[in-house]
Image: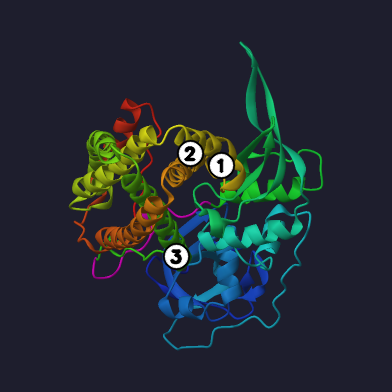
Amino acid sequence: MDRTENKSDTPLFQVGNRVRVKYGVIVPDFPDIPLGGWTGTVTEVEQADDQITYEIKWNKRTLNGMHPVYLKRCERDGLEMESMRLGEEDIEPDDGTQVSLEQPTQIKTPPLSERDQDDRVRMVFGLTHDDPIPEISLETLLAYHRYLTANLKFPFNAYCGEEEVGPFSRKRATMTVTGLLDPMREGLDVEDGLVCKGRGRGDEIEVTLAEIEAGKNPNFKLISDYAYWFYNWPCRDESEIDREDDGQDIWSEIPPPGMLIFTKAVLLCVVGGGILGATIGAALKTFNGAGLAALIGGIPLGMIGALILGRYGIIAGAVNRLRFGAFLGAVLGSLGGGLVGVVAGLTVVALPWSLLGLIAGMFLGPYVLPQKQRRLVSFRAASFGTCGGVLISAFRHDQARATAGAVSGAITGLVAAAVLLLLLIGAVYLIPRTPMGDDEEDEVFEKVEEEDEDHGGGLRLRRF
């Protein structure tokens, strides 16, 4: 901040002198904030065009006594609050006598304006014009989601990137936005922000909200304001977060999973384990040769899964500093691949019902299960459909044996899935982690990017 009205030729103060602001002086940028009694030390003297100005660094007492509105305004406008430039007529020597800091008597906060885009963003969070716009975080994104859900008019047409219409031509792609994904149900990624859903060329699609353009409709201002905020107030980089005084690594404190996510994961694993157990139990009890078919399918796919996830576990373990990342990946890969192989083997002995279930799951899955990623939905739906087909075939073959096998298998699957999930959570959150410096961390992620390029992209790792 500058206040340059001094016209004397010789500086009265030198660098290192302690000075105090005279009563009646105000902040040049904020006429409702007085400076009387503020004290500090001269750090720079500047003389130009017969004007002398002093840069004053405020002392601790002044910093502690600053009015909260002044601090908000400095943060809002990007002004330096620890120092200020003042003219010679505004300051006097500080003889050590403590005087009271002059305080504002009437704060004049301008009302929020619909014409100011910053103010429109502040309205979302219930702020005043004096408040700085908050950075992107989980809490602010959830607040923005509530605001947009209450104010957007659905459905509406929007542009969502470009599409090819010929060998050398492209045009803007359009979609009909039908709503916003629920961040609490779908799992909000702070880096992507809010996500909208809709239809494009007959398909159900999902696009990050900041990437669409609403065009000429009542939602244009709301969407553009969100994109303006999302791209200009990004979340802080982890390297800027202050570390603890004792030097404790900020990555060593791993937050526990949210209760909603934890409950959802438990239910999904337990239900999936029960269905798989019932399917395998019914097939083994009913079909001749089912055990051999399960071994033929399960062993090779289990080995392949162990190799793939074991390699992935090495990278994930390095990123998250897990000492046994490769081992955990291999165990999960062998279990997952083995189960897929067992079901694949049982599919052969349960034809044609297993094949019909597979086809039904692939076609009906997108209309029954939540569609976050079409690839995952298709696989999950196909798996449930296949299990349903195997169960139908088993009950048609021998209902008594199939019932006994399904009950015992379901109980075993439920217990095994719950135990496995608890062991996995314990392994991820309780295994000691090795501290990693910034240089080591950068080196690890460079290796991850190289691995991703070698395999055509698509490898996504994040810290737990």
Residue 250 falls left or right of residue 163: left
Residue plotted at (60% across, 81% down): 23
Secondary structure, mark 1, is helix
Q: Where does residue 429 sit, x and y in percent of width and height? A: 28, 62
Q: Residues under labels 1 and 2: Cα distance?
A: 7 Å
In the rendered image of this protein, does residue 95 appear above or below residue 85? below
- Residue range highlighted in magenta: 234-247
Is residue 237 within the magenta segment?
yes
Could you say which quadrant of the image residue 208 lies in? top right
Which of the numbered marks, if any, corresponds to residue 123? none
Q: Which of 462 and 76 is in front in this view?
A: 462
Residue position for label 3: 263
Local packing at callout 1 (Cα closer than 10 Å; few below 14, some 14-19, many 20+) is many
Which of the numbered marks, if any, corresponds to residue 382? 2
Q: In which quarter of the image is the C terminus?
A: bottom left
Secondary structure, mark 3, is helix
Which of the numbered marks, if any, corresponds to residue 365? 1
Residue plotted at (30% across, 39% down): 290
Q: Residues under labels 1 and 3: Cα distance?
A: 23 Å
Residue type beneath disc 3: Thr
Residue type beneath disc 1: Gly
Could you say which quadrant of the image residue 364 lies in? top right
